[in-house]
Image (cartoon, rainbow, N blue to C red):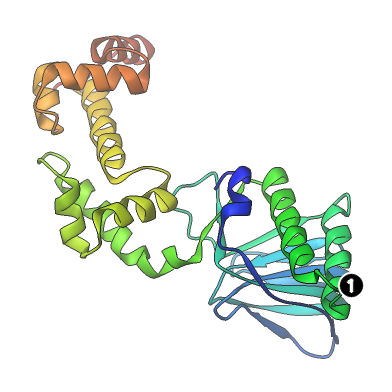
Amino acid sequence: MYISNVNSASISLKSIEMQHIATENNYTIQSFDDLAMIYINKGAANFDNGKEIYEIKKRDFIILNPNHEITIEPVRKLEWIRIDVDGILFTSSLEINSAEQLFIINDAYRTIKYYLDLALLESENRFRGSDIILKRLLECIMVHILRNNHLSIKDSSIQIKNNEIELIQQFIRGNYKEKITLDQLADLVEINKYYLIRLFKQKTGLSPIDYLIHVRLSEAEKLLSQTNTNISDISDIVGFHSPSHFSKTFRENNHMTPSAYRKLYKNRTGVVTGE
């Protein structure tokens, strides 16, 4: 989600509080139904993600998506600020289908800490207009996270439909050679087609039809670079069924014609294999 969309997202602050964690035992952080964000104010802990051990230290900001948990091993007595937020979750902006549910960023310039301290003050004292100020402070925190890290936010309701979106992706990858319509995809998962476009685009960054074109072009690139198959035949094989439409779409996405792409690849490798 673009930074400009933060103020239009369905973000709701559920709670914010300072917490102290002793060093005697391991501690499990659970996010339950809300996004949990934890700012390390003092102390340190180790976290094992199954592959390697990370050290969580002062000024680190832990972001844990809804319905997940992690267990940490405190090294020094921890003091942190915990925020629970409803309505959104975080995802990597570098990988469309990222399955990551935990992100750890560092607040090197203490900008986020500044907003958190103000939010704590408003939450604990409940001055007149505190709800308005808390909403704006939360938006400021989100903007700073998105500005300085390769992260995006999206509606947490998308999680509910993840299986349906993945089913559509699998269907498209398995049937891209055939004619596929939006109505057909909507019927497949029993979702209104306009709602489907919204969910699919928020998860993948593409509409279902754009994703279909992306798959077809990827397969066409393989055939152009790895075989001597006639370009008009490639058009039919990957599902365009119109050489002129195929060439136009390929040129719009790759900034060159299919024949130029094949020639470029051949010049780079010195060989194009047979069918």
Residue density around tag 1, few if under 14, some if 14–19, many if 20 or more, within 10 Å: some
Q: Is residue 18 left or right of residue 14?
A: right
Q: 102 or 9, which is in the foreground?
A: 9
Q: Residue at x 88, y 66 (%)?
A: 117
Q: Which residue is mark 1?
A: 121
Of the 4 image quadrants, the one containing the C terminus is top left
Numbered disc 1: secondary structure: helix
Number of numbered discs visible in the structure rendering: 1
Q: What's the residue at 33%, 43% (across, down)?
A: 207
Of residues 80 and 161, the one drawn nearer to the viewer in this rendering: 161
Residue 144 % position (x, y): 74, 49
Q: Residue at (73%, 72%) from the top-left corner? A: 83
Q: Is residue 229 above or below residue 222?
A: above
Snapshot quadrant of residue 31: bottom right
Residue 227 position by quadrant: top left
Q: Quadrant of residue 15?
A: bottom right
| Residue 141 at least partly seen | yes
Of 244 and 254, nearer the camera is 244
For residue 8, above or below residue 76: above
The residue lying furthest to the front in this view is: 128
For this orientation, the residue located farthest to the bottom is 24
Return the residue nearer the eye: 267 or 1: 1
Q: Judge whether residue 75 can be spotted in this image.
A: no
x and y, in percent, of residue 88 in the image: 56, 63
Q: Is residue 10 left or right of residue 104?
A: left
- 245 vs 124, left or right, is left
Above or below, comparing residue 24 to residue 112 in the picture: below
Question: Which residue is pictured at 35% across the width and 16% down the height?
Answer: 269
Relative image position of residue 266 (x, y in whole percent): 30, 12
Q: Amino acid at mark 1?
A: Leu
Indicate the position of residue 187 as horizontal and vertical percent values. Answer: 16, 60
